[in-house]
Amino acid sequence: MNGVLDAIEAFFDRLTEVDFRFVALAICCHLLKGMCTSRAWRNTLAAAYPDEEVPWPRIYAAYLAGIGVNALMPFRGGDVVKLGLAHRAIPGATYVTLASSLLVLAIVDSIVALGFFAYALTQHVLPSFASLPDLPSFDYHLPLEHPRVSAVIVVTLLVLLVLGAVKAKRELDEFKARVRQGVIVLTDRWRYLRTVALWQLGDWTLRLLTVACFLAAFGIDVTVRNVLLVQVTQSLATLVPVSPAGIGTEQAFIVYVFRGTVAGSKLLAFSVGMKLTLVATNVVVGFTALALTLRTLNVGSFLRRRRNEEAPAES
């Protein structure tokens, strides 16, 4: 935590050096990125439910609400909100189909992220497993320094997964049918490439442009190498999402990756500035979308009501 506070202090110390024109441009790219992602998801759902109207504005609102909640909650809690709002937007939709539709989006995301990670490996800048406990990040400090507690958490998660699998097996045929429905767009290769993959490539292009704008705003060289390495640190920070928005882990990685090439204080100011700006943007647009959709910000009440409505239909 002290490392994070030091990084925030470094950010405010360099605030007068920031070019806010590039910050504004970065925010625009970030918002456009969300539009591309939500459009890809909407098209995936439209293929899954060809007889239903799948309104993009409501799916976009669900996506924005999800990232807004994820910005404040660890363990991807916003994904539950995202699925709940999407379920509300599509009559007759099931959570299994909605969740499996996200697997379609994971294909391009995984390929691109692995490609960037492979590039980072060729640069020999990533920390080894042995050096992870020494990184100034509270995200990894607890599990690496307390292996017994981590083991209990992992075992608990595995037990829950097994119980979930046993429950799913009872209605295996129906479950498999709903999963197939969620990924059915993959059976039409051209439709998938045109309506899903293309939008996701736009998403990744805008991600890189966002990073480039922030680098320019903080006076760091905007090169392909620097942009890709920053993106890799962001991806690595999401692997263990135990803190809101991966705060702490990302700063630790970026200082390690750019060690010896950029001043540490400038790196911390850049990383924290980018993170705080994007988190604030996600929270504002996310909770605005949530309020406009539900006419309330009481997420828990909404989810409980949806579960109660689903219970009679499933019984």
Image (cartoon, rainbow, N blue to C red):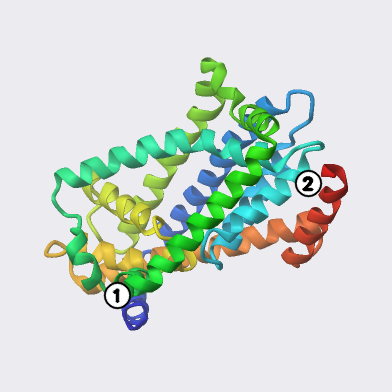
Give the image quarter of residue 219: bottom left
| Residue 16 rendering spot, x and y as whole percentages | 35, 75
Using residue 147 as the reference point, say whether residue 134 is left or right of it: left
Camera-side residue of 146 and 190: 146
At a point 47% along the width and 48% down the height, the residue shown is: 29
At a point 22% along the width and 41% down the height, the residue shown is: 119
Camera-side residue of 179 and 255: 179
Q: Look at the image and tell me in which quarter the N terminus lies.
A: bottom left
At a point 32% along the width and 70% down the height, the residue shown is: 147
Secondary structure of the residue carrying tag 2 is helix
**Residue neighbourhood size for the residue with mark 2, other residues' Cα within 10 Å, grouped as few (<14), some (14–19), many (≥20):** some
Marking on residue 145: 1
The amino acid type, in three-letter code, at marker 2 is: Arg
Q: Look at the image and tell me in which quarter the C terminus lies.
A: top right
The amino acid type, in three-letter code, at marker 1 is: Glu
Q: Is residue 17 visible?
A: no
**Residue neighbourhood size for the residue with mark 1, other residues' Cα within 10 Å, grouped as few (<14), some (14–19), many (≥20):** few
Q: Earlier in the sequence, mark 2 or mark 1?
A: 2
Give the image quarter of residue 125: bottom left
Q: Are marks 2 and 1 in contact (CB under 8 Å)?
A: no
User: Where 262 sits versus 191, above or below?
Assistant: below
* Spatial CA span between label 2 and label 1: 43 Å
Using residue 92 as the reference point, say whether residue 124 is left or right of it: left
Report which residue position mark 2 lands on. Answer: 88
